[in-house]
Image: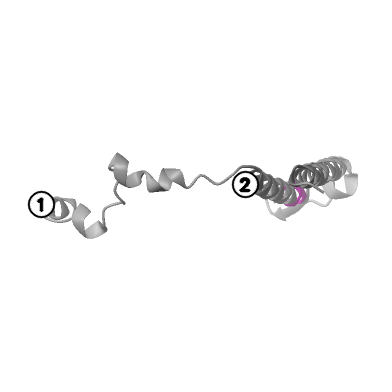
Amino acid sequence: MTSRSKADAQMARAATTLGIGVAGLVIVRLFVQGLPMFQEAGWIVKGKLTVVAAAVIVVDAMLISILVGFAIQLRACLQNGFPRCDAIASRRGVLGISQRPSASRCWSGRNSQQRR
């Protein structure tokens, strides 16, 4: 199995997981919003949070976790698909880009007295 076919299989698996997860949670969300037992359950916090709203919040949190998982899988697939370019880091000295200055240099002297 070549690296290209491994990447394609990994991407297909991630897309399938995303599709099944999103479709399942959309169906669950529609059931939660439509079932009378959730609507008649009333309030969790009087005047602020109903049972339906809490259930929808939980379903949306699960949906976000599926989307984050897909983003992580996509990132891993893209990282493996492209060669690493270390030349940019080695060119830092030639371009004159220094590291971020330390906090003591940023707030020394008159500026630190004015900020306090």
Q: Of tags 1 and 2, which is closer to the observer?
A: 2
Place of residue 49 in the rendered image (x, y in percent of width and height, measured from the top left): 69, 50
Residue 79's disc is: 2
Kind of residue indicated by mark 2: Gln
Q: In the rendered structure, does residue 57 fall within the stretch colored magenta?
A: yes
Q: Residue furthest bottom?
A: 104
Q: Nearer the viewer, residue 90 or 67?
A: 90
Q: From where the camera sits, is residue 48 visible?
A: no
Q: Is residue 77 left or right of residue 39?
A: left
Place of residue 104 in the rendered image (x, y in percent of width and height, measured from the top left): 21, 59
Place of residue 27 in the rendered image (x, y in percent of width and height, measured from the top left): 86, 41
Residue 65's disc is: none
Q: How is the image coloured?
A: one colour
Helix, strand or loop for the magenta stretch, by majority: helix
- The boundaries of the magenta stretch are 55-59
Q: Nearer the viewer, residue 7 or 26?
A: 7
Please tell me which residue is depicted at 82% across the width and 49% down the height of the picture: 1
Q: CA distance from mark 1 to mark 2?
A: 46 Å
Residue 110's disc is: 1
Q: Earlier in the sequence, mark 1 or mark 2?
A: 2
Place of residue 98 in the rendered image (x, y in percent of width and height, measured from the top left): 29, 48
Kind of residue indicated by mark 1: Arg
